[in-house]
Structure formats: structure tokens, C-alpha cells
Image (cartoon, coloured by chain):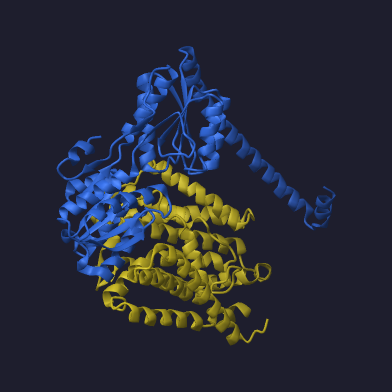
Chain colours: A yellow, B blue
Amino acid sequence: MEFLKNNNISRYGLIAVLFIFIILLSFLNENFLTLNNIIIVARQVSINGILAIGVTYVLLTGGVDLSLGSLVALSGVVSAFVARSAEIPVFFAVLTSVFVGACCGFFNGFVVSKGKVAPFIVTLGMMTIARGLALVISGGKPVSGLKESFLTISGGSFLGIPNPVLIMSAAGIFSFVFLRYTKYGRYIYAIGSNEATAYVCGVNVVGVKLFAYTICGAFAGLAGVVLASRITTGQPNAGIAYELDAIAAAVIGGTSLSGGVGGIGGAILGAFLMGIINNGLDLLNVSSYYQQIIKGFIIICAVWSDTMARRRESGKVI
Amino acid sequence: MPYGVILWRADVNQVKLYRIMKINIKITTTLVLTILLMVCGCKRSGQNEESLKTQSQQKTIGVSLLNLSSEFIVMLNKAMNEKAKELGVRLIVYDAQRNAEKQVQQVETFIAQKVDAIILNPCEVEASSPSVKKAIAAGIPIINVNSETRDEPTAFVGSRDEESGKIAMEYIAKRLNGKGNIVIMQGFMGQAAQIKRDQGADEVLKKYPEIKVLARQTAEWDRAKAVSLMENWIQSHGNKINAVFAHNDEMAMGAVLALEQAKMKSNVIVVGIDAIADALKAVKEGRLDATVFQDAKGQGATAVEIAVKIINKQPFEKETYIPFRLVTKENVDEYLRK
């Protein structure tokens, strides 16, 4: 089948760009290729990485989720409230946050799949709803005074690897296996490739889409906890434009905006490319004005070279 | 319409479609009814207040605020409400949500409602200017609070943002004995607060040639971005950094978090601006070295006071500058109580 083939194409173009960039930076700055800096980049990437993993599910169905940034803020604020009280255990704060994200995602999925409303509009609506809710719950002020154990979610590390990186890796491995080797994972690709065909073949289109949006929301909730723990507050204004970074990471990694093509590995690679650009330009002390220009160009070039490599591989002419 | 009919006929499953439409109509009707009920509920509680106040022939002040999802503006609003209650005037508060066009519309609404005065917390220097022009043309006094517009209002209440940058940098220079390396975390590039806080800091830096700015970069007022930026700076400059000046407390807190994680906080001075609750707590705990207090309470209360003075045709100050104040561990308790 078409979608199986597309998914197996490797990301040579992107990996090449990533390597060129890493080599260039390590020549320009001696601090770049140190273990410490690699850990820092991985930690900085993890929130965007988790979001990119989540949004990949939705992008693969041919949809889009613009509400991610607001969901991060909402779930962050909720988890911060839970994490304030000394009696409630930390995992419960994580659970509520993921649950809140999943609920919002479920709502998105329900209106998209049952109501047949364009995902752009539904998730745009959710973007303002969730932001509003976050502001209402927090009263417009950051929620602080979180207990120590909650802060270790992002602050702690295991065998030298920061927890956020472990969380991202776990989410990545789970999603990779799920999308590649399970029946429902393949259904997601099938729907994105051709929804009508998938329906005719007996795929429960509504159910699978509902699942994709729900899990995307759940990952946003997870990212919300990681962020709240990292910045030690639940910020109602946090996460603005995070959805664009997440979608960009997924698309840089080769996931198609029209669905059916792409995967988790690419999304994580894309997130790393964005993180490395950020870190590298900061290390080189490039002015903030120029940083934006350079970032834009690198992203376009990366995707361009990746597209060319893929086209050559699949032997397409047009 | 005929096109719709053709589509209708073309559908094989007419009955099913009809059923779906029926359900849709039901859903829509319920939704509309709910919203209407909610609106009515809100209106009613509002009307009660209104009737109470018209009885005592209260003066009305229209307030258009920059953005009620920012902590500082929330504090400004609270101070205004308290002062209005004290002085017995009625406030109508609108949130412009950072949208200058919306703000102009809100002022137009105030003019149509014939309010006695308008307090404007401008979104932008240029784009909010028409609001001021329109109010003055309609003969309604308008008071700008916290930031300026190009057109001159009846009165202005605010603080000089340059002053905050100056106070923060003076503190750093004093702590470093006029010698050392610093990094500067800027606000969102191009915004008045960023430009002016930079100006204020630069003015001080001119006096201390031995203080070197290692890097200057924006973290867009954002704590998460500030953590990442500080981590990157620690990588590239390491132990050379003696002090961090952040244009707001959110970013200063981010810098503190990154420095603490790298176990470097004890060697680096961090200073922010705004004196938000979190930062005050951090100053108290000795994690943040200093912040600069922008007096939201003073600004909000003074703006209402001056509005009332103008309404009552009493003499008033055309420009009032509420001073910034440095907050360190020594005087933080004073501010924590507020």
C-alpha cells in the first residue's frame, strides 16, 4: 500500500543538514559539542518534542491542532494548583494535567470527526477557550508556591539524563511502536492517505480520529506539567505559539500537512534541529534580530533538501 | 438556494440527511437559548447595579485597559476599583486585549454612552492615539495611565520606564563595585518598555566603562525562554558572568532557575523589574538579588483621583510620575504586605 511505502523512506536529507550544522557549530564555538551542552539542548527540546510527537498523530490523519499552546498553559495551571497542596501526591498532579489535556483533545476530536467541522476552526476555537479557561482558573496571575517534589519532574535526572528528556523518549518510543506496529496506528496512516477508502475498507474513521486528537491533547497536558515544573509556576500566558513550533518540528521531520506521510522519528529530529539552531545562535551571540532571519532560512533549507532527497529516492519527476 | 436544492436531491440518503439536519437544528437552538439565557443573567445583575447608582446620580468613568491577562494590569484595575469605590464614582472597565483597534472602538462606545471621563491604558503609542483625539473632540476628558500616546491627553499618570532600567543597573554597578561582566535579557524587541529599559541601563553603563556587556538577547518577557537563554549563556560564557539584568521579573526568575540548576547562583547577581509576587518571594528568600517596583496601585489610584478632580472642575496635575523603587532583601517586607 502507498502509505506504507511513504512512511519507510528515511530522512537522509534532514540528517545531513543536522550533521552539517553540528559540525559547523562545533568549529565556531568550543562549548557547543560538550556533553553538558548536549544535555542542555536535549532538555530545551523536550517540551517541543513532546508536543511534536502528539501533533504528529493529528497531522497523520490529515488534521491539524492549533490549540496545543493553550492546552499547555491550561494543563500547566491546573497541575500547578494540584501541586500546591501538600497532601495530594505528585503523580496525581501529572494525571489531572494529562486528563485535562485529553479532555480538550477529545472535544476537538469529537467536533472534527462527528461534527465534520474543519480541524483548523475547531482547534482555533479550542485555542481561545483553553487560554480563557487558564486565565479564569488562575485569575490572570501565575500560580506559584509549588512543592519541591513536583519540581523534580523537570529538575531531576536519572543516570545524568534530565527527566524531561526521559519523558520525551518514553512518549516517543510508545508512539513510534504504536504508529508503526499496531493495527490502530496503521489506521491513522490509512485515514490520512485516503479517508474515503479507509472508510470503505471498514476502518472506524470517527473512532480513530477521536483517538488521534485525544492523545494529542494528552501529550499537550504532559508537556504542560513538564513546563510548569521547569519554570516552577503555572503560567496562564505560557505556551504562546508553541503549536506552531510543534507543527514545524513535525513537518521539518517529514510529516505531511495533508496527512498519511511521516512519523515520530522525524518529529523528534525536527524538534532537535530547531533546538540546536536556537542553542547554537545563542552560543555564537548572534543578535536577536538576525536570529529570526537565520532560523527561518535554515528551516526552509532543511525541508527543501529533505524533500529533494525523498523525491530522488522515490524516483518522482513531477 | 436552487443550488442547495440540487445538492439535496443529489443526496441518496435524503431521510438520513434530514434527520441529521433536524438534530443540528435542535443543537443550534439549544446553544442559542443557553447563550441568550447567560447573557440575560449577566445583564440583569448589571442592571441592578446600574439602577442603584443612577439613583445617587453617580459620575461615570470609562476605563479601557491594555490587557487583563497581565498581572500588572490586573493590579492596576484592582487599585482603580478600590479608589472608585472610595470616591463614589462608577467605573465601566473594558479589556482591549492588546488590540489597539478594539481600544478605539471601546472609547467610541464610551463617547456614545456620554461618560464623564475616560481612563485609557494605551495599547500602543501610535495606534491608540485616535482614541485620545476622539475623546477630546467629544469634549470628554481623557487620562492616559501607564503608557503614552502620540496625541496629548487631558492628563497623564505613569512612570518613566527609563528610570526602572537605571535603578536596576545602578544597583548592579554598585554591587560589582563598577567592574565586571554582565548579560542583559531584553523584553520583546521593539516594545516601548524594552527600548526604554535598555536606554536607562545604557545611561548608567556609560558611567562605568569597566562593566562589560558579554551578551544582550531577548527572551520575550517569557520565563521558559529565559531559562533556555540563560542555560545557553552559561555554556558560552560560564564563570565569566558576574550579573544578569533582566527587563522583567519573569525573565529574571528564569535566569535564577537556570543558574541554580548549574549551581552558579551564589556567584551571580540577578536583578529584574516589576516586583511581581513571585519575584518578591524570591527576593525574600535571597534567590533573587533585587527587583524594581512599579507602583500599579499608585498609578491606578492616582488616575481615578485625577479623573474625579477633572470632573469636579478642580485644579489637577497634568503629568504625574509615580516613582519606581528598588526592592532588596532589606525592604522587601514592605512590599510583600501590599
Marks counted in the figure total 0
Residue B68 in which image quadrant = top left
Quadrant for the C terminus of chain B, please.
Answer: top left
Whether residue A232 is visible here, answered yes or no, is: no
Where B243 falls versus B76 (above or below)?
Answer: below
Residue B101 point in image, percent of width and height: 55, 41
Residue at image position (46%, 32%) is: B153
Residue at image position (20%, 53%) is: B172
Residue B5 point in image, percent of width and height: 83, 50
Whether residue A285 is visible here, answered yes or no, is: yes
Residue B94 point in image, percent of width and height: 49, 34
Where A152 falls versus B132 (above or below)?
Answer: below
User: In the image shown, does B291 or B140 lie closer to the viewer?
Assistant: B140
Residue B283 point in image, percent of width and height: 20, 47
Residue at image position (38%, 70%) is: A281
Where B287 falls versus A63 (above or below)?
Answer: above
Where B26 falls versus A80 (above or below)?
Answer: above
Residue B207 in which image quadrant = bottom left
In-image side of B9 versus A94 (left or right)? right
User: In the image shown, does B261 or B240 lie closer to the viewer?
Assistant: B240
In-image side of B81 versus B265 (left or right)? right
In-image side of B19 versus A115 (left or right)? right
User: In the image shown, does B48 or B299 lie closer to the viewer?
Assistant: B299
User: In the image shown, does B306 or B74 lie closer to the viewer?
Assistant: B306
